[in-house]
Amino acid sequence: MVWARTRLLIWDYIFEPVKRIKINYVGPHPDKFYKEVNKLIRTVFNVPDAYVQEKEYAWEKGEEAEKFDVDWEVNKMLDTFSYITVEISLKGFVSHDHGKASIVMRPRLITEYPQDTVWQNSIVYEMLRRVWHKFFYHQRRMEYLVMGKEMVVTFENSVKAYGEQLRESKVEE
């Protein structure tokens, strides 16, 4: 991320026009998705803990059931100007070791250009930046989009595979 007070943002959804990916699970032990999603975030996206924020954590345990709602934001830094951000949400409930979970992902590629100085706000700088972006950086951004798609699909397939393991009760207690 560019550290600037004012910046120009170019924001692309990884799977245009789809803005979010949703996985629903109904079966045994949906609460176990919390640890698995937390682990997969760090391994699939290959980001240090400092770039993963657990923005919301709510786990309500009643006499008969548990409800949970957890939100993460993952930032994968790519270079000085671009990064991939993925918002991941896990919601669900479990009652007598059976329940429902919903995992929603919102992946985006964001490029930031600083606009703080007089030079960066000038028309000459903007023309040069646009030429540089069009002829040199655009191809790099397209490579980042492909990389983002691969990471999100890998994450999605890993979550689905874990759900199948839970259904077959092959996951250790």
Image (spheres, helix red, strand yellow):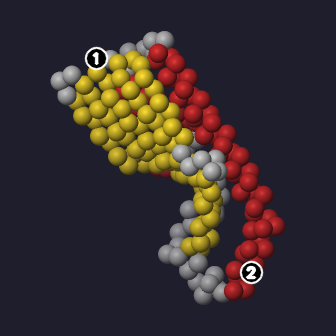
Secondary element at image label 2: helix
The residue located at (24%, 34%) in the rendering is 60
Residue type indicated by callout 1 = His
Splitting the image into 4 quarters, where does residue 35 fall?
Answer: top left
Instruction: Tell me if 156 is positioned left or right of 167 in this view.
Output: right
Q: Which residue is mark 2?
A: 127
Q: Residue at x 27, y 28 (%)?
A: 66
Instruction: Rate crowding at label 1 as few (under 14), some (14 to 19) or many (20 or more) other CA atoms within 10 Å.
Output: few
Give 7 or 100, whichever is nearer the viewer: 100
Quadrant the N terminus occupies: bottom right
- Determine the CA span between mark 2 and mark 1: 63 Å
Q: Secondary structure at mark 1?
A: loop
Q: In the image, which is nearer the foreground, mark 2 or mark 1?
A: 1
The percent position of residue 161, horizontal first and vertical second, equals 56, 23
On the rendered structure, is 172 left or right of 97? right
Residue assigned mark 1: 96
What residue appears at the point 56 percent right and 73 percent down from the top-left corner? Answer: 7
Q: Is residue 42 above or below residue 28?
A: below
